[in-house]
Image (tube, rainbow, N blue to C red):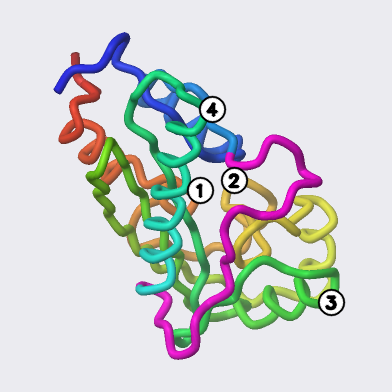
Amino acid sequence: MAFPENQIYLASRSLRRRELLKQIGVKYKILLMRETLSRPYDIDETPMQGESPDEYVYRITKVKAEAGWLRLTQRQLPLLPVLVADTIVSQDSCILGKPKNQAHAEEILSSLSGRSHQVLTAVGVVFKNEIQIRLSTTTVRFRDVTPQEIRHCINFDKVYDKAGAYAIQGLAATFIVEIHGSYSGVMGLPLFETSQLLEETGIRIFK
């Protein structure tokens, strides 16, 4: 199915995801899940007991897709595909989440120091009653990082809204020894999986 002006909605506040869509020439409109920051969250992102990182990120992406389509229809906006995504950091099958404060951020980055972890990003596209989701899993290994470097990174990159307390496009890039998987997936939107989903939905990447 073709869509007017080859355009989608992006249901995300992430500047990185906007930049990545622009990188592959995708036109989008922002579909905010909340109109103001003072409103309650639309989605409860608390992990369920016994839920694996894969199951969690897939579930949250599906819930985001459903909520995005509901918001679209409630506002009676033109019907276009809605793109959603969710990114988490996992180590030893545990979800690390976003840091609650300075001490928590230091704890997370200390646990990543000198070890490998996984960054999981699920991307979903919803149009009408059909939701398609793809999962990207990337393994990242940090060098040994000193407490002073960790504190500097936290203050420099302002990590409190970032899964795993770091941004690969920030100072934390100097900690990374190797990556196996998708760089754009670690940024928050795996472009291989995203382009596949959009092409299958009718959004042409290669016109």
The residue positioned 45% from the left and 62% from the top of the image is 60
- Say which of marks 4 and 1 sits in front: 4
Given contact means CB atoms under 8 Å apart, are the residues at marks 4 and 1 in contact? no
Which badge, 2 or 1, is on the more N-terminal residue? 2
| Front tag of 2 and 1 | 1
- Mark 2 or 4, nearer chain start: 4
Are the residues tagged 2 and 4 within 8 Å (C-beta)? no
Q: CA distance from mark 2 to mark 4?
A: 22 Å
Q: Amino acid at mark 1?
A: Met
Residue 97's spot in the image, x, y percent? 61, 70
Residue 4 rendering spot, x and y as whole percentages: 29, 11
Quadrant (top left, top right, bottom left, bottom right) of the C terminus: top left
Q: Earlier in the sequence, mark 2 or mark 3?
A: 3
Q: Nearer the viewer, mark 2 or mark 3?
A: 3
Left or right position of 116 against 62: right
Mark 4 Cα within 10 Å, few/some/many (few <14, many 20+)? some
Q: Is residue 39 magenta?
A: yes
Q: Of the two numbered discs 3 and 1 on the same chain, state the one appearing first in sequence.
A: 3
**Secondary structure beneath disc 2?**
loop
**What is the span of residues highlighted in magenta in the rendered image?**
33-54
The residue pinned by badge 3 equals 103
Residue 9 belongs to the span the image colors magenta: no
Residue placed under numbered mark 2 in the picture = 169
In the rendered view, would you say 2 is above or below 83?
above
For residue 30, which numbered disc appears in the image? 4
- Looking at the image, do the residues carrying marks 2 and 1 touch, with CB atoms under 8 Å apart? yes
* Marked residue nearer the N-terminal end (4 or 3): 4
Q: Real-space Cα distance between discs 3 and 1?
A: 24 Å
Task: Identify the residue under disc 1.
Answer: 187
